[in-house]
Image (cartoon, rainbow, N blue to C red):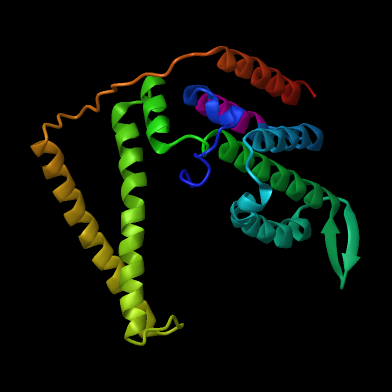
Amino acid sequence: MFNEYINGNSIIHRFDPRIKIIYAFVFSVIIALQNELIPSLIGLLISIILVMLARIRFVEIINRLLIVDKFLLLLWLVLPLTYPGEPLLKILGLKISQPGVLFTLLLTIKANAILLILISLIATSSIFDIVHSLLHLKIPEKLVFLFFLIYRYLWVLYDEYEKIMRAAKARGFKLRNSIHTYKTIAYIVGSLLVKSYNRADNLYRAMVGRGFCGKFWLLEHFKFSPLDFWGILILTIAGFIIIIV
């Protein structure tokens, strides 16, 4: 996620990463707490504007939105039928609740708005800037290191999983609803756990061998610019608009 949108020269890309992390968190909380459609729609509009300012084409992030919307589709299939309230219409004897439709629509708008804000503000910074910013924001170092190492080695483990699956498929393995498939998946998960443990042990030994003592030293620091000041001002006003409306 963090590698696709970091190469850009937009206003959002030039913002101080610390500001982007703070406002991504603030906007996510503000939008998540909204119970009305209008402020949620304003939040969605602001998130779309941020994506446009970041110069990210919507075609590139549709797949990201679809991942969230697939889960929301399940809600659309369940909530309108089970949510109590005045029926909006009846289809084949099933009552579709009006409050259920509005509630599911609210969840859909908020989920997409938060995801677009995270993409525009967080995904436009490199993982190193994010980690650096979290340390500056006084997030506990152990949590930051854990986040960084999980991010770094999650892709390594995914590559291992891809290799194992390719090897299994080359031997004729196919995913089916059978005992053989379950056993094979269990072996693959077990193999990944063993490889993860060995890799973590080797990494720790290599870091200790290079003098690691539990602290990552920051050699470069962010500089606050006039652009950051205007960014804070505009984002603060946008946040107040969502709250007040």
Q: Would you say residue 185 is visible in this rendering?
A: no
**Which of the two residues, 61 or 201, is positioned nearer the viewer here?**
61
Q: Position of residue 235 (x, y in %)?
A: 65, 22
Residue at image coords 60%, 17% = 232
Residue at image coords 72%, 44% = 109
- Residue 220 magenta: no
- Up/down of 103 relative to 209, above or below: below
Specify the quadrant of the image occupied by residue 207: top left
- Residue 24 magenta: yes
- Up/down of 244 relative to 73, above or below: above
**In this image, 106 relative to 135: left or right?**
right
**In this image, 139 relative to 25: left or right?**
left
Q: Position of residue 179 (x, y in %)?
A: 37, 84
Residue pushed farthest front? Answer: 9
Specify the quadrant of the image occupied by residue 42: top right
Q: Quadrant of the C terminus?
A: top right
Residue at image coords 77%, 20% = 244
**Which of the two residues, 24 or 103, is positioned nearer the viewer here?**
24
**Which of the two residues, 178 or 202, is positioned nearer the viewer here?**
202
Residue pushed farthest right? Answer: 89
| Main secondary structure along the magenta-highlighted residues | helix
Q: Would you say residue 91 is visible in this rendering?
A: yes
Q: Position of residue 127 (x, y in %)?
A: 40, 37
- Up/down of 224 relative to 75, above or below: above
Question: Range of the magenta residues?
Answer: 20-30
Q: Position of residue 37 (x, y in %)?
A: 79, 38
